[in-house]
Every structure is written in structure tokens, then in C-alpha cells.
Image: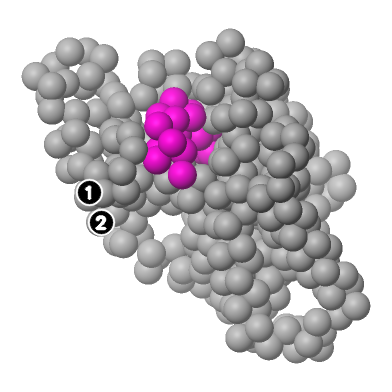
Amino acid sequence: MLSRTDRRVVAAASLLVVAAAVTRYVDINDVLAFAVAGVAIAALATLVGRSVDQLGDRLGAGATGVLQSALGNLPELFVCIFALRAGLVKVVEAAVIGSILGNILLVLGLAFLVGGLRNGVQRFDSDRARVISAMMLLAVVAMLLPSLAFQLHTPAASHERALSVFASVVLLLVFLCSVPSSIRRTVDEAAAGHEASGEGRWPMLLAVVMLAVTGVLAAFVSDWFIHALEPAIKSLHISQAFAGLVIVAIAGNAVENVVGIQLAARNQADYALSVILNSPLQIALVLAPILVLLSFVIGGATFVLVFPPLLVGTVVAAVLAVSFIIIDGESVWLEGAALLGLYGVIAASFWWG
């Protein structure tokens, strides 16, 4: 069952969730409420990380990455839904693109940097890396085609809603087709899982339940987070674009932030890469399409796959850069530093809006 350390982590996360609830429903400074909710999401991410560690040698890197990314993106989904209902379309646009950029530049960069400094050159399954990077590139291009049609003033520009819905359905179908290959275990993973000792392991049911519970709690905390977002933006004098691209994206993807870096530090490069890159892939294939379809029924602002040109350009450039870096199946700390530098420049370019 749970070790003493695990129980402490659960207790700390529970206290932070309670604190976030108090700051939401008690008249307290909006910036404080915003910060506490963000820290609570990060604490829940730590619990997800420990659960993923328990499942890793049983499910394999691919299945673990898909499961963890699906639950890890729940806060992002709820944050965007609440933001759309509040009419914060610019925040949602920036958050969707920012989540992709945050994972493939910030989180992957930190994972390469920490893992490289601690373990030297890290190697991972190059075949799986090529498949993930190719799928991510194709998914991002498909997601951004409505933006291209709009910016070039093609005949499809006047039908942005219909085109966005069609593209969303296609992307969801592609995701369903990709699941079997994503969760298939390699020979090495199967052997490692067969030989792994059960000592100190949680029961499988406990690990899955822990993942589910933390996902649900993260959804509630995301609601409190977005409630304090707009007042906090005004108090801190930052733009909606920067808030969505950096603050909301990092908080909404705190799970991948914590888990991916922890796995890289332990020299589990395959698991780290799968967890980190499955998240932006699912954002392009699942989260963005679901937001398009849900926006027609949840009330508030309508969301379509038409993004500002700078967002389009930065995400395409970032995906191409990451694909080039990981295609050789190994990483060094300097590549991580370069990814972090690129993320910093992109974030700075959106500070003013």
C-alpha cells in the first residue's frame, strides 16, 4: 500500500486543495487565490507522477504516456471550457498553442537539461520518437489549416466554423486510429515488466484510482483557477495572450511538467519522452477538437481553429525544431538548454499581447 512518503504527498496535496477552495469562496486577494490554485494543481501533478511511476513497468512507455497525458490534460480542458464560458477567447487560443509549446519546448527542454546533466547522453526508442514527432507535425498542420485559409482569404475563409468542425472530427478519428500503435509495448519493455519485482508496488487498482481521483480534483481546482484569472490579469497588468500562452498553459500542464522531468532525472528516457510528447499530440488531436465541438453547446464564446499568425508560426517552427532534435534517438543537456532559450524568446514576444 502507500508508503510513508506517499502518505505525506497525499496529505500535502489535500491541504493545498482545501486552501485553494478557501481562497475561492472567501473574499481574499485575487492574485493570492490565483497563485494558490496554481500550486494546488502542481501538487496534484506530483500525485499523478507517483501513480505513473507505479504503472510504468506494467503498461509500457506508450500506454503509460497515453493514459497519463489523457488525465494530465483534464485540467487544461476544464480551464479552457470555463474560459470560453467567460468569453476569454484569446486566453483559450493562446492556452491551446501555449500547451503545445510548453510541452515540446519548456518541459522537454527541462527534461533534456536535467537528464543530461545528471546522466549524460540519454537514449530512447528512435522508432517511437519518429512516429510521435511525425504524428505531432501532421496533427498540428491539420489543426492550423483553417487559420491558413482565413489568413490567405481563400473561399473557405467565410466558412471557418464548418471547416473547424470538419477538421475536428478528422483529428479525433486520427487519434482513435493512433491508440493501438501508441500503447503497444516493445520487446524490451515487456521483458522489463516481466522481470520487475512487485516489492514496494501499489496494487494496480490503487494506482488507477489515484490517477482518476487526482484528475477529478484537478478539474475542480481548474475552475477556481480560471475564476481568479481575469482579476489577476488586471492586477498584474499582463495581456490575455501572455496569460494563456505561459501561465495557463504551464498550470494546466503541470502534470507533464513534474512527471516528465522526474522520469528524465531517473534516466527513464523512453517514459519521459512518451509522457511529454503524448500531451501536445493529444492537445492537437483531442483537446482542441473537443473544445471546438463543445463550444457550440456550453454557452459563452464560440471556439474555432483560427489562430493569430504569430501563434501559427511559432508552433510550426517549434514542432519542426523538436522533430529534428529527437529523430536521432538521443539527447544531451545542450539541446535542452537550446529548447528553453527558444521558449523564452517566444514567451517574451507575447508579453505585450
Badge 1 marks a residue whose secondary structure is: helix
Distance in Å between CA atoms under marks 1 and 2: 5 Å
Q: Residue furthest right?
A: 4
Residue 88: name its quadrant. top left
Q: In the rendered image, which residue does mark 2 sit on?
A: 173
Say which mark, if any, is on residue 7.
none
Dots 1, 2 in contact, CB < 8 A: yes
> Residue at 84% of width from left, 50% of height from top?
119
51, above or below 239, in the image? below
Question: Residue sitting at 32 percent across and 48 percent down?
Answer: 298
In the figure, is residue 329 to the left or right of 279?
right
Amino acid type indicated by mark 1: Val
Residue behind mark 1 = 170
Density class for disc 2 (Cα within 10 Å; few <14, some 14-19, many ≥20) is few
* Extent of the magenta region: 82-104
Q: Where 269 falls versus 322 (above or below)?
A: below
